[in-house]
Image: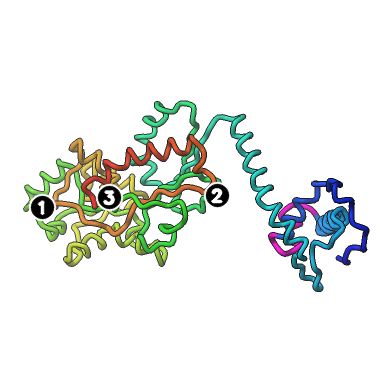
Amino acid sequence: MPPPATTPPRRPTRRIDTGFLRAFEAAARLGSFTAAAHELSITQSALSRQIQALEAEVGLALFARDGPRIRLAPAGERLAATLRPLLAALDDMVAALRRGAQRPSVRITTFPSFASLWLMPRLPLFQAEHPEVDIAVEASDRMADLETSGQDVALRLVHPDNPLARTPGTRALFEERIAPVCSPRLQAELQARGGLRRPADLRRATLIADVGTMGGQAGFGQQHIDALSWPGWFAKIGQPMVEPQSWLHLNFTHQAVQAALAGMGVAMGQMVLMRHLLADGSLVLPLGEPQASGYVYHLALRSDATRRPEVAALVQWLQAQLLPDGAGMG
């Protein structure tokens, strides 16, 4: 793009045409006319014409051209510094106006087992308290980037070493604990067949496992699998893994819970997900107290969601509901 022709400066009181400011802000932020044009879904030539028109309006060069590269000229630096917060404030106001014309809503993301075993049974309590708020739940093992996914709130179970545990807007809640669980009926059957008092007695039982706990992705994913699996529990208690009578492999944690409730075997239970089933006697802990897994529940908020009252209401409710689950567990 050729440098702008020298033009006499506009009268200081003349108001510039603001229609070209978006093009200028994008080019200044991205440092590229091509990237700015792509972001704004216009051609590069159209964006160049808008920049030229703005420079003509101002009467000064806003960019310094060095072949195909661009950089802000001193006048462009000053304009960009003033323009960025103004456009951000304008965008925030428009978003608030749009929300005001719609029902308040909150989008929450968490992993599938937590969604099905913990969140969904309790969510009617929040809806009864806040019938005006719409809730959208995304259950996925993929941990969404809240700043780009459109999700407002995330509940995650991650190791403190995971970078997601240290992102802005994330707070640690409490540590998950694990222990073998089974139905009272199966516990009685195993006691009659020789007892179920020590970890070694599990060789007479069927062990239930998610298929993911027998392998998986490397890195934090594999560590998560190991920590919450049968091998992880045996490692925590300092005993060698036993070979059970048989294995029952299932796709999802909630399936493993259903199988345990049906008396099909002994499952490795995550206490937050099992607490209500242990409290009402549907499941029991045949081998004593749970062990710390090393994994911590975290509540994460998108940066621009914190000012919305419906998000604040959901977060306050989640914390009140989760506190009893964390009591005495870490």
Report the residue marked by disc 1: 196
- Select label 2 or label 1 by which is in front: 2
Q: Amino acid at mark 1?
A: Leu
Mark 2 = which residue? Answer: 149
Q: Which residues are magenta?
A: 29-42
Residue 42 visible in the picture: yes
Residue 37 covered by magenta stretch:
yes
- Whole-angstrom CA distance, mark 2 to mark 1, is 47 Å
Image quadrant where residue 58 sits: bottom right
Q: Nearer the viewer, mark 3 or mark 2?
A: 2
- Could you say where residue 101 lies in the image, as x and y percent from the top left? 62, 29
Q: Amino acid at mark 3?
A: Gln
Tell me the residue at 77%/70% (across/down): 69
Q: Is residue 182 above or below residue 222?
A: above
Q: Above or below — where is 108 with respect to 10?
A: above
The reply to whether dot 3 and dot 1 touch (C-beta < 8 Å) is no
